[in-house]
Image: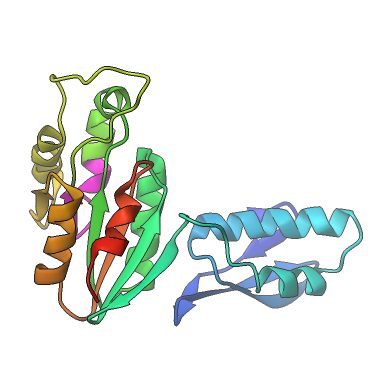
Amino acid sequence: VTTDSLSFEAIRYERSHLFTTIQTEGQRKTLELLVPGRHNVDNACAALLATKIVGISIDQSIQALASFQSTQRRFEFKGEKKGVLYYDDYAHHPREIDVVIETVLAMFPDHQIFVAFQPHTFSRTKALFDEFAKVLAKAPHTIITDIFASAREEADPSISSKMLADAALKYSRSESVQYIPTLEELAQYCETQLSPSSVLITLGAGDIYTIHDKIRG
């Protein structure tokens, strides 16, 4: 992938750190990031170009990027409990979800991956229903909770998370898509059904992140 005068090579992960080789002006340099994902490498390349324009050296910028720890609810590590790794991300649009699933699969190729998604608003779920179903089917194990309703809209009985789970199951290769209505039930599922070496990431713009405090260590 090339960004003007910068390019990067294949991404690799070591202990959740992302490494890639940057080429700039005929030089090869190693870029290390604490934030995972190909999209963050694109962001880093854009940042390197911007700092270069204002006179900051590539080496200084690479060093600064290596310490950036992102923000809350963007592939945020929530902790390890009983050998299960827990993450959370604000992703609530199909394209965002697709990137997160791609990233977690690349980071943990030898783990069981569980993606728990809480749809945000009835209107968005309905408008992008098929896109949501297709992208959620890409995860090895998908869990969908009830829709997080918005104060700006009425509940719409013509759409539901159960319908979305059924649709995603039709696209799923692993045929592992579950509808778990409440966050309390999701927390209980995590405690009783996930095993050591599993990874679970919660997705959504609602309150699904609160399950991490409900799961007993």
Q: Is residue 1 visible?
A: no
- Residue at image position (27%, 57%) is 211
Give the vertical position of 180 relative to 105 (above or below): above
Left or right of residue 21: residue 198: left
Chain part drawn in magenta: 134-143
- Residue at image position (26%, 48%) is 117
Q: Which of 168 and 148 is in front in this view?
A: 148
- Residue at image position (36%, 73%) is 79
Quadrant where the N terminus sits is bottom right
Q: Which of the 4 image quadrants contains residue 196?
A: bottom left
Q: Can you give x and y, in whole percent of width and height, for residue 107 in the image? A: 38, 71
Q: Can you give x and y, in whole percent of width and height, for residue 58 in the image? A: 80, 69
Left or right of residue 127: residue 152: right
Q: Which of the 4 image quadrants contains residue 27?
A: bottom right
Left or right of residue 70: residue 48: right
Q: Can you give x and y, in whole percent of width and height, for residue 74 in the image? A: 48, 56
- The answer to whether residue 45 is magenta is no
Give the vertical position of 140 relative to 32 (above or below): above
Q: Can you give x and y, in whole percent of width and height, for residue 16 in the image? A: 45, 76
Q: Is residue 92 visible?
A: yes
Left or right of residue 81: residue 87: right
Q: Which of 209 and 130 is in front in this view?
A: 209
Asked which colour scheme the image uses, the reply is: rainbow
Q: Which of the 4 image quadrants contains residue 63?
A: bottom right
- Residue at image position (35%, 48%) is 98
